[in-house]
Amino acid sequence: MLCPKCGKEMRKGYLFSSKDGAFSFANEVPGALENAKHAEGFVKLTGLKVGGRTSVPACCCDACRVVILQYRKEAEEL
Ligand SMILES: [Zn+2]
């Protein structure tokens, strides 16, 4: 994966969370009491992983501080 900012090859790795978290994406961060799934533009990136760290393969450019991730299709079913 090439960095969209500088065009150099990005470093491969994983974006991971605290031990009980899960990642999602939306237009804005929903409030704590709001059901996140109802946020506009909601996309579930990972499921919950009890007892482990939620992770998703990602590429990182240290120079530009850009991380790009590709979420798995399975995440939608978790
Ligand atoms: Zn870059």
Image: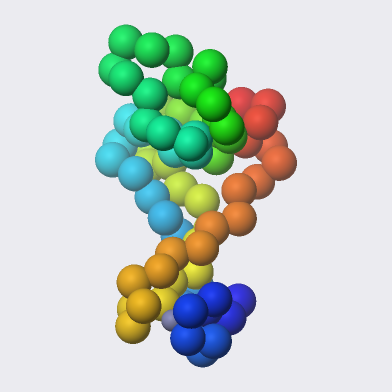
The quadrant in which residue 69 appears is bottom right
Quadrant of the rendered image holding ligand 1: bottom left
Identify the colour scheme used: rainbow
At horizontal 54% and vertical 26% (from top left) the residue drawn is 40
Q: Is residue 2 above or below residue 45?
A: below
Residue shown at 37% from the left, 31% from the top: 29
**Depth order, front residue of 38/12:** 38
Compared to 61, does 18 lie above or below? above
Residue appearing at x 55%, y 40% in the figure: 45
Question: Can residue 69 be seen in this snapshot?
Answer: yes
Whether 78 is drawn above or below 73: the answer is above
Q: Where does residue 48 sit, x and y in percent of width and height?
A: 46, 28
Looking at the picture, does residue 3 appear above or below residue 32?
below
Residue under the image location 66 percent in, 31 percent down: 76
Q: Is residue 63 left or right of residue 56?
A: left
Is residue 13 visible in the rendered image? The answer is no
* Quadrant including the N terminus: bottom right
- Give the left or right position of residue 58, taking residue 78 as reference: left
The location of residue 54, given as percent across then percent down, is: 43, 41
Residue 37: x and y, percent? 53, 20
